[in-house]
């Protein structure tokens, strides 16, 4: 069953006298529990697509329907409310707040929800346990390795239990062993929890963890990958 449906999805903006079009009439279907990797050169529209799916940006033209709702028609306020319930975002550089502990960073998205303090503590503890970093809950980002910081960022992305995770170069700042561990974790979120994952990457090794890979160039799909028989354990 299709979860995300893009039709004629276009994003453009003006830069001086020029029209820049990072996405140009893109059509894309993403089924429930898919793990999709997006590849392409810089400026091909990958991050723009992630931001549209995440509700951070809105298209200039076309429709973006997620679980039956065309989010391209939502007001900014309704889009923000929808995003807090439906999407977790994992960034390349973690985007953790340096003056907050790992626990407090993960708790941040829950402050937008009507949970008691006890419920927030329970959800944060479960998320940190899921990513294998519960023993670092009271550490600040500067006290963590890059791989540990990314695990905290992933815990923050899943703490509200969103059905969709978008990841923009989640291993781009990590060494090989840390990247492998993070990708195994993301793969588990897909296979064990059924999260639908859309990931941007430049690393072909990272795409091996995904179920399929699509290539973008100049805002359009130029090649569609096939469902992989299996991903690395």
Image (cartoon, rainbow, N blue to C red):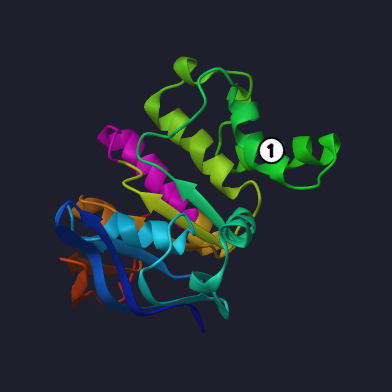
Query: How far across and how far down the image is residue 55, in percent?
Result: 49, 59
Query: How far across and how far down the image is residue 212, in percent?
Result: 31, 70
Q: Quadrant of residue 46?
A: bottom left
- Name the residue nearer the viewer: 156 or 72: 72
Give the residue displayed 53% in from the left and 52% down from the top: 88
Q: Which residues are magenta?
A: 172-188
- Name the residue nearer the viewer: 99 or 169: 99
In this rendering, position of residue 48 left or right of residue 216: right
Asked if 84 appears above or below 155 in the picture, the reply is below
Q: Quadrant of residue 228?
A: bottom left
Query: How far across and how far down the image is residue 221, in percent?
Result: 21, 74
Asked if 54 appears above or below 227 in the picture, the reply is above
The C terminus lies in quadrant: bottom left
**Mark 1 surroundings within 10 Å by alpha-carbon count, few (fewer than 14), some (14 through 19), many (20 or more):** many
Asked if 25 appears above or below 176 in the picture, the reply is below
Asked if 37 appears above or below 8 in the picture, the reply is above
Provide the secondary structure element on which disc 1 rests. Answer: helix
Q: Is residue 210 visible?
A: no
Q: Quadrant of residue 209?
A: bottom left
Give the residue displayed 56% in from the left and 36% down from the top: 132
Total numbered labels placed on residues in the image: 1
Q: Report the predominant secondary structure element of the magenta stretch.
A: helix
Q: Which residue is the site of mark 1?
A: 124
Give the residue displayed 29% in from the left and 34% down from the top: 173
Q: Is residue 27 magenta-colored?
A: no
Q: Which residue reaches farthest bottom?
A: 1
Query: How far across and how far down the image is residue 113, in percent?
Result: 74, 47
Q: Is residue 39 visible?
A: yes
In this rendering, position of residue 151 left or right of residue 161: left
In this rendering, position of residue 177 left or right of residue 158: left
């Amino acid at each position: 069953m299709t979860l995300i449906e893009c039709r004629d999805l276009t994003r453009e903006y003006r830069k001086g006298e020029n029209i820049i079009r990072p996405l140009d009439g893109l059509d894309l279907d993403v089924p429930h529990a898919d793990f999709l990797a997006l590849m392409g050169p810089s400026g091909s529209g990958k991050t723009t697509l992630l931001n549209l799916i995440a509700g951070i940006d809105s298209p200039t033209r076309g429709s973006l329907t997620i679980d039956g709702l065309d989010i391209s028609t939502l007001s900014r306020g309704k889009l923000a409310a929808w995003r807090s319930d439906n999407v977790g975002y994992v960034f390349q550089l973690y985007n953790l707040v340096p003056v907050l502990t790992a626990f407090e960073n993960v708790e941040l998205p829950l402050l937008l929800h009507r949970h008691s303090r006890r419920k927030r503590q329970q959800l944060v503890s479960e998320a940190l346990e899921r990513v294998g970093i519960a023993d670092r809950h009271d550490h600040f980002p500067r006290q963590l390795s890059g791989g540990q910081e990314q695990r905290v960022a992933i815990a923050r992305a899943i703490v509200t239990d969103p059905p969709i995770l978008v990841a923009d170069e989640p291993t781009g700042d990590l060494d090989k062993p840390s990247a492998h561990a993070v990708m195994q974790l993301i793969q588990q979120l897909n296979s064990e929890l059924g999260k639908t994952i859309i990931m941007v990457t430049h690393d072909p090794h990272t795409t091996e963890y995904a179920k399929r890979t699509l290539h973008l160039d100049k805002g359009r799909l130029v090649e569609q990958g096939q469902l992989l028989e299996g991903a690395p354990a």
